[in-house]
Image (cartoon, coloured by chain):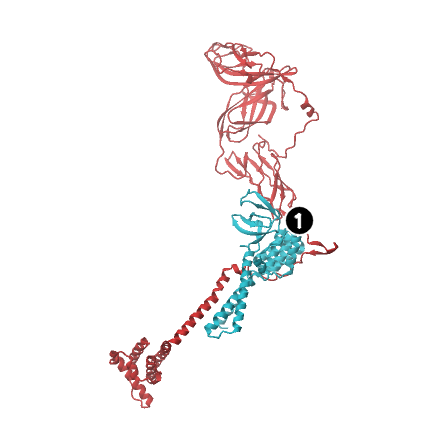
Chain colours: A cyan, B red
Amino acid sequence: MSPRNFCFLAILAAVTAIPNWGGATTNDDFARGLEWSRAGRFPEAAAAFGNAAKAQPAVGTFLNLGLAEWQRGHAGLAILAWEKASWIDPFDPRTRDNLAFARQAAQVEAPQLKWFETVSTWLPPNAWAWLAGAALWLAVGLVVLPGIFGFRKTGWQQWPAALAAGVFLLCLTADIGVVSRTQIGFVTRKNTPLQLTPTHNAEVVSTLAAGEPARVLRTRGNYVFVRTATGAGWVEHDGVGLVCPQ
Amino acid sequence: MLTPVWLSAQVPPHLPNSGLIQLQVAQPAVDVSSPVTATAAFDPPIVLPGGKSFYRVNVNATESAVEWPEALPAPAGLEFGAKARGMITQSQINSYRPLATFLYEVTGAAAGRYTITNFAVKVAGEPVEIPGATLEVLPAGSSLPADYAPPRRLLLEVTATNLFLGQPFRVRVLLPSGPGGQIAALREIQLNGEGMMIDKNAMRQAIEPVNVQGALRPAYVCELLVTPIAAGPVQLSAQGFSAGSEFTAPISIRGQVSLPGGPPKYQLLISDPVAIQVRPLPVDGELPGFTGAIGKFFSDPPHLSADRLQVGQPVQLKLTFHGEGDLTRFVPPTAPRSRDWQIIADPPPATTFTFIPLTDEVQATPAIPFSCFDPQTGKFEDLSVPAIPVTVTGTGLPVELPTWDDQGKAGAPVKLSRLATAPGRLASSMKPLQQQVWFVGLQALPVAGLVALLFWDRRRQYLAAHPEIVRRMRARRALRRLRRRLEATADAGNAAEYVHLAARAMSLAVAPHYPADPLALVGGDVLAQLEPAARNGQAGETVRAVFAAADAQYAGTPQPGPELAAIRTGVEAVLQKLEEKL
C-alpha cells in the first residue's frame, strides 16, 4: 500500500470514528441503567441514564430516565426527561403516552403553545432547519441559475420555485416556533416557591407543582424569571429545567 | 480539678407531690410596721495600732429604705478601707424582718479611743438614730485582752486570675469555722466587681476542711460560676451574711463539724479583693461556628441513628463533647440551614439534632460548623461536625391509573411504557440547529456559490464583447508553452528544432496584433511589431536569421544556420519583448 493510500485510509477511519467518541461509555451507562431499573434501584438507574443522556442524547435514554425519575417520585424531572425525548423525536408514541399519563397523574397541564410553536411540533426541530435551508436555496437556484446559464425560462422551473418559496416560508415560521420553544422549561421540584423578587428572603407569590410548564424569560444571578399559567415570578435556577439547556 | 461532664438532654424539674400545694400556701408577710431600731459596733472593739476592725451598723429595715450618708462623723486618725452594704430577711414568728447592714473596714493608725458619735439617718422618711460606737487602739507593744477574737473574714479563691472575656471560672467563697470550730452558713452571698456575671444556678455548697494559714480547718464553702463580660483589670471581692445553721440548699459535708444551735446571728462579712485580669478574645483566627465555648473540648465521632431512610423520615444525630473546661455554660453548635433538610436542634445544653430529609437527592447530612477557644493555647479549635453519608429513598408515584367509560364502568388501566431496550434515535445536541452558529455559517456556502456564478457570468459576457483579450490570453498561454519547449530543445542541442520553434513562437506572439493565423505570418510581420531601434538592431538580426533558417528548412534546402548558442539569447530577448506587448 502506497503512503498516499495509507494516509487516506487513516484519515477516513478517523473521520468515521469521530461520531462514536464516547459511544462505548454511553452504551455502558445505558446498559447499567437498564440493569438497575430492572433491579428496582432507581436512584442509581437515574444517575446512569443521566450520564448516558449527557454524553449522547437519545430518545430511549430519556424515556428510561423519565421512568426512573417517576419511580423515584420526581414527577417534574420525569416530565422534563420525556419532553426531551419528544423534542428529539416527536413521533415516538411511548413518550407521548407517558407525558399524557404523567400529566394526568400529577394534575399538571401541558405547555400552552402559540400557533407557530404548534407548527414546529409537526417535525423534529432540526428537520425544519434543513428543510428551510434546502427550500430557500432551491427556490433561489431555480430563479437565478437559468439566467446565468442562459436557459430559457419555462413553466416547469417557475412552479417548483414558487413551491419551494412557500415551503421556505412555512419552515421559517416553524423555525421561529422552535426557537421560541427553547424558552419552555418545567418545574423540577414539587412546591417550588414562585417569588416576587430574586432574593433569598423574597415574598412567595405562590408555589408551583412539579412538572408545571414555565417560560423562562430572563436570568439574574441564581434566579430565573418565569411566566406560568398561574402567574409570573422568580424561581431558583435549578427549580426549572429547560428542554434545551442554554 | 473539674471532671469531664457528659451532656444530655435537659429534663423538666420534678416537683414533689406536695410542691404545688406549697406554692399555694401564703408566704409570711414582711414586717415593716415594727419600730425601726439600729445598732452600731466595732468588731473587734480593741485593736493594736494598724490593726483592722469592722464598723458595722445594723438597721431593722430594708436597705433601700435607709438614706445612708456618704460620709460618717468619724474622728480623725481613723482610716476607712473597704466598705459593703447588704440586706437579709430574718425569720420571725409569722413574718420576716428585714435587716440592713452597713459595713466599713477601719484601721486605727495610732493609739487612742476613736468614737463615731451617734447620728441620725432617715429610714422610710423617718429619722432613726444610729448609736455611737468606740474603737480602742492600744499602744504599740500592748497585749490584747484574753477574750480578743480577730474579726471574721471571708476567704475568696478563684481558679484563674488571667482570663479571656467570656471564659467561665469558678469562685470559692469560704467561711472558716469560728471559735469552738462552729460552722456557720452564708446567705445573700454577693461578688463585687465590675463586668462579672454570676451564675447562681451553678452554685454548690459544702462544708469541708480547708487550709487556713497552714492549718486545716472546717469551713463553709460556696462555689459559684462566674463569667467575665468586660475586659480589663477587675477587683473581685465577696460579701455575705453569716446565718448560723440556715443552709438554703443541699450541702455536702466532709469531716467532723459542729453546727450552731439556736437563732442565727446575722453578720455581714466581706473578703479581701482578688485582682483579676480579663483579656478580650483575639479577633484573628476565629473559626466558623463559634458559640462562645471557651475551654479545652473534645468531641466523639457523631452518631446518626440511621443511615438509610426515606424522605420525611426523621433521624437523630447525637454529638458528644468532653471538656477539661467548664461545660455548664457550654453552648452547643447551632443548627445549620439547609434547603434539603429540616433540622431541629434540641434546646441547649442538649447536643442532639433531628434531621428530616426533604428530598432523596441528598447523599449526606450537612456539616455543622463548630469551634471553641482554647485559653491555654490562645487559639480557636475546630470542632466541626463532618457530613455523614446517608442513603435517602423517595416515595414512588403511581405507574398505572384506572379509567372509566362513559357509563362509569372501569376500563383497562392506563400504564406507563416499558423500558426502552436501546437508546434509539440519537441527537448530537439538544440545542436546535437554528441556534447553532455553524449551521447559520453553512448558509453562506450557497450564497458564495451564487456570487461566484454571477461573477463568472459577467466575465463571460465581457470576454464575448472583447475577443482581442481572449486572443491575447490564448497567445500568452501558447507562447509560454512554446518557450518552455524552446528551453528544453536548446538544452538538448537540437538547433534545427530550436529554429523551427522560435519562428513559430514569434509568429504566435505577434498574431493577435493583426489579428491573423500565426501560420500565415512571416518574419516581416514579426519585424513590423518591433520598435524601429530594435528592428534595425540585434533583435531584428535575430528575427531575420531565425526566419531565414526556418524558411530554408521549410523549402527543403537546408543551409548552415546560425549557431544555437549565438542566437539563443537573442531569441529569448525578442520573445520577452513580444510577450510584453501582448
Which amino acid, mark 1?
Thr
Q: Where does the C terminus of chain B fall, quadrant-wise?
A: bottom left
Q: Residue at x 54, y 68 (%)?
A: A163
Residue B501 image offset from top left, x and y in percent: 34, 82
Position of B482 compared to B383: left or right?
Answer: left
Horizontal placement of A149 versus B7: left or right?
A: left
Look at the picture and state if B198 lies above or below B39.
below
Q: Could you tell me if residue A18 is visible in this image?
A: no
Compared across the picture, whether B555 is left or right of B372 comes to: left
Specify the quadrant of the image occupied by residue B197: top right
Q: Which residue is mark 1?
A: B395
x, y percent for residue B173:
56, 23
Percent of width and height locating residue B39? 56, 11
Looking at the figure, which quarter contains the N terminus of chain B?
top right
Q: Nearer the viewer, residue B6 or A138?
A: A138
In terms of secondary structure, where does tag 1 sit? loop
Toward the front, the furthest residue is A155
Res A108 seen here: yes
Q: Nearer the viewer, residue B115 or B446?
A: B446
Q: Chain of mark 1?
A: B
Q: Nearer the viewer, residue B175 or B536?
A: B536
Front in this rendered view, residue B180 or B526: B526
